[in-house]
Amino acid sequence: MQRPYVTIFSTMTIDGKIANSSKYSKLSCDDDFKLQHYLRSINDAVMIGANTAIIDNPSLTVRLVKGTSPYKIVVDSKLIIPTSLKIFSNPKRSIIITSNDSDPEKIEKFERIGVKIIKVNKNKGLDMESALQKLYEIGIKKLMVEGGGNLNYSLLFRGLVDEIWITISPFAFGGGISFLEKGELDEIKAELYIKEIKQLCHNWINIRYGILYPKKPIV
């Protein structure tokens, strides 16, 4: 399988949460935002899940550093997202990954405004291996993921992630939405190694991890 080089970027609390139970997720500092925009600028595309797209309505553009804004990709198995989201302000630079059995009328609605639709099979979740292969075939060689817990989980434990850039903020929720938000994580299912550590804004720490396993080769 040929697929993009995949990097997950996320900011979390010291107890591993990316948002609280009310979906509050403002955890970054200025240096962390700049690092996020830098990573966007060196990738061909940035990917989020449908829930993140609806709740946060991000633009996913490069603004805080010099560089070109990447393609914007939403993983949405049921096509629940509206066309009014900021990521569709330039629809020809937008991609939706959905299932083969999604509503044809909804697909046509997005295709009509210029959004590219990638359809894959669904079996206990979308076939992300096929999705990444199709992204590679259209020229996406480096992919940044700013996912929620479900998207992070589905990629990492299928061996489809090469690096994780985690910023640990000086906050704790004691509950909420985890960086990995699916399944029973009661055993070691992944092993990482540290590639770089940076201190941000005095009290934030960014750790750049490589993946030892599970990992599938890029080519």
Image: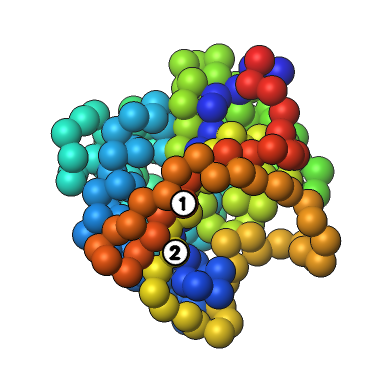
The residue tagged 2 is: 168
Q: Which residue is mark 1?
A: 207
Left or right: residue 169 compared with residue 86? right
Way the structure is coloured: rainbow
- Left or right of 209: which side holds 199? left
Question: Crowdedness of circle 2 by 10 Å Cα count: few (<14), some, many (20+)?
Answer: many
| Place of residue 124 in the rendered image (x, y in percent of width and height, measured from the top left) | 80, 49
Answer few, some or many: residues within 10 Å of disc 1's Cα (few below 14, many 20 plus, some between 14 and 19). some
- x 46%, y 26%: residue: 142
Q: Helix or strand or loop: what does disc 2 sit on?
A: strand
Label 1 with label 2: CB-CB less than 8 Å? yes
- The mark that comes first in sequence, 1 or 2, is 2
From the viewer's side, name the closer residue of 85 and 147.
147
Nearest to the observer: residue 134 or residue 30: 30
Residue drawn at x 72%, y 28% is 216
Mark 1 element type: strand
- The amino acid type, in three-letter code, at marker 2 is Ile
Relative to residue 39, is residue 190 drawn left or right? right
Does residue 29 sit above or below 211 in this rendering?
A: below
In the image, farthest residue toward the bottom: 174
**Cα distance in 3D space between marks 1 and 2:** 8 Å
Task: Identify the amino acid type marked 1.
Answer: Ile
Residue 151 x/y as whole percent: 60, 51
> x%, y% of residue 94?
39, 34
* Along the viewing direction, whichever of 196 and 48 lies nearer the viewer: 196
